[in-house]
Amino acid sequence: MNQMEGMTRAEIDKAENKDFALGSGPKRPRDAATLILLDRQGGDIRVLLGRRSRKHAFMPGRFVFPGGRTDPADSRVPVARGLHPQEEAKMIARGTRATSARARAIALSAIRETYEEAGLLIGRRADFTARQEGWQAFCEHGVEPGLDALRFVARAITPPGRVRRFDTRFLAAWRDDVAVALPDGGPTQELEELCWLPIDEAREAEVPTITRTVLGDLKARLAVDPELAPGGEVPFYYLRRNRFHRDLL
């Protein structure tokens, strides 16, 4: 059984009691995206993680992937290439309430957050112009963002009872897709101790339960699909009737 599948809400609350501030009242999850950047080294595949400041209310001190809340304005940012059709189809599959524009915004927010938190610009070298906030470094360094290399690998909705709730799409890309790596990192400095870890080591680090779970899913997929071909199955985690479920999109 997958780590989170079948857990009760009480079990999830106990496992995550240091990661989320609890709060009463219904809160609609906000769209968010996170990027799992992969690097082949010898026989291992490593992932990029960074530690969140212990002062943060959301997942303080935990190692996480770059990511954050989706800005709808990101959907209007020009790209070199859009999402692969099979990947877009997964992101707007029945039951996700997403549209093509929303899928595009989610994917672009993962790229923007990876720049802001890790200083890595994903795309291709080319003249680029965008007015939207958060994209000026791409203009200055001549990087046109691209979505065609992204793979949708997991989705998870934060359980109720948290002060902040997110409907997070986990996307993956390869380190080779990074066009520019800024030596001083990203402007927000939100992630400390950026490091590349083999997947098994990453799962044993101080990571949130959902991160450990998604890494397990990703490891299993890479074992049979080492190139992450478009259109692969996407595990979707959500709480229903007091128990965590895992569906496949």
Image (cartoon, rainbow, N blue to C red):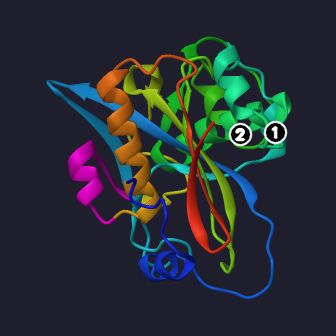
Packing grade of label 2 (10 A; few <14, some 14-19, many >=20) is many
Quadrant of residue 136 in the image?
top right
- Provide the residue designation for mark 2: 106
Q: Amino acid at mark 2?
A: Ile
Element carrying mark 1: loop
Look at 50% across and 49% down and name the residue there: 66
Residue 198 visible = no
- Which x, y percent locates residue 31? 73, 52
Residue at screen point 36% across, 62% down: 207
Kindly give the residue lying farthest to the bottom in the view shown.
24
From the viewer's perspective, is residue 96 above or below residue 45?
below
Based on the displayed image, in which of its 4 quarters is residue 73 positioned? top right
Q: Which mark is residue 135?
A: none
Q: Are marks 1 and 2 in contact (CB under 8 Å)?
A: yes
Compared to 73, does 221 lie above or below?
A: above
- Residue identified by numbered label 1: 98
Magenta range:
192-206
C-alpha distance separating marks 1 and 2: 10 Å
Nearest the viewer among 173 and 140 is: 173
Q: Residue furthest left?
A: 42
Q: Nearer the viewer, residue 69 or 168?
A: 168
Quadrant of the snapshot with the N terminus: bottom left
Residue type, label 1:
Ala
Q: For this rendering, which residue is in front, 208 or 193? A: 208
